[in-house]
Image (spheres, helix red, strand yellow):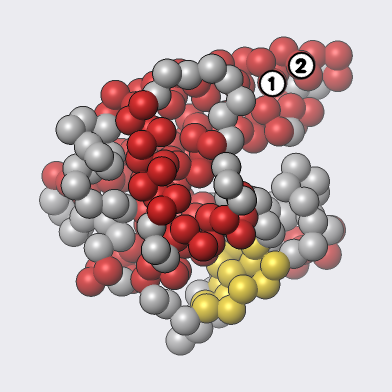
Amino acid sequence: MTYRLYNRVGSGGFVTEAALALAEAPYELEELESKPGTPLPDSFRATNPWRQVPTLILPDGSTLTETAATLIHIAACFPDKGLAPPPGTPEHAAFLRWMVFTNVNVYEAVLRRSYPARYTTDAGNLEAVQEAAIARMGDALAVLENAIDPGPFLLGESMSVADIYVAMLFIWFRGEIDAPRLTAMAERVRQHPLVGPIWRRHFGDR
């Protein structure tokens, strides 16, 4: 019943690794020798046709991709670990809302900023694509900042995997933003006894 996680240092796979650690799930970590922002080797298509991490091999041998999907799945598989509210509750509905919102609006903007050539056929327009992505990411983070009410986490007093996901993306933002709640939440994630060491291995003191 062991998971296998394909990841690389500094990538979005950090949050899947953190979720597995919080779940106390047995897993093997396969770290790929490539830097974020560079394409994975073509040979990785056999594992993930989209050549992206995180790629999680489940205990039955099936493959799960997409960061948000891995988090929702791990939380569902280990309900006693409190990684997400119980399904069917209003709190779980809010959890799903912010997971999907973050994936569609924040992470997507990160990809447009990092890989602008994927989003336009005009090679002379890449800087504009990146600028628009940074602005869009800032707008989405502002929505999440307002959602942390009363806090200290998105869903109230308890940290979920959604908070770890948002905290990671928040430190990737390259624009200007006034976000004291997100800043405080990210610091709580950073200082978590299980998540903190994984954070520092991926992101250092960021």
As drawn, the label of residue 127 is: 2
The answer to whether 151 appears left or right of 183 in the picture is left
Q: How many neighbours does mark 1 have within 10 angstroms: few (below 14), some (14-19), or many (20 or more)?
A: many
Q: Name the disc covering residue 130, or none.
A: 1
Which residue is at a point 64% across and 66% down the rendered structure image?
Answer: 6
Query: Looking at this view, is 106 or 46 the one in front?
Result: 106
- Asked whether, in this view, residue 96 is left or right of residue 133, the answer is left
Cβ atoms under marks 1 and 2 closer than 8 Å: yes
Residue 76 picture location, percent across and down: 31, 65
Counting from the top left corner in percent of width and height, residue 40 is at 79, 55
User: Picture quarter containing residue 116?
Assistant: top right
Q: Amino acid at mark 1?
A: Gln
Q: Is residue 190 left or right of residue 53?
A: left
Placement of the C terminus among the 4 image quadrants: top right
Residue found farthest to the bottom: 1
Q: Considering the numbered disc 1 on the image, is that residue within a helix, a strand or a loop? A: helix
- The amino acid beneath tag 2 is Glu
Give the percent coordinates (x, y) of residue 18: 47, 62
Residue at (54, 36) in percent of width and height: 171
In the figure, 202 relative to 139: above or below? below
| Residue in front for this viewpoint, 206 or 123 | 206
- Residue 88 seen in the figure: yes
Q: Nearer the viewer, residue 168 or 126?
A: 168
- Which residue is at the far left? 89
Can residue 16 be seen from the camera position used here?
no
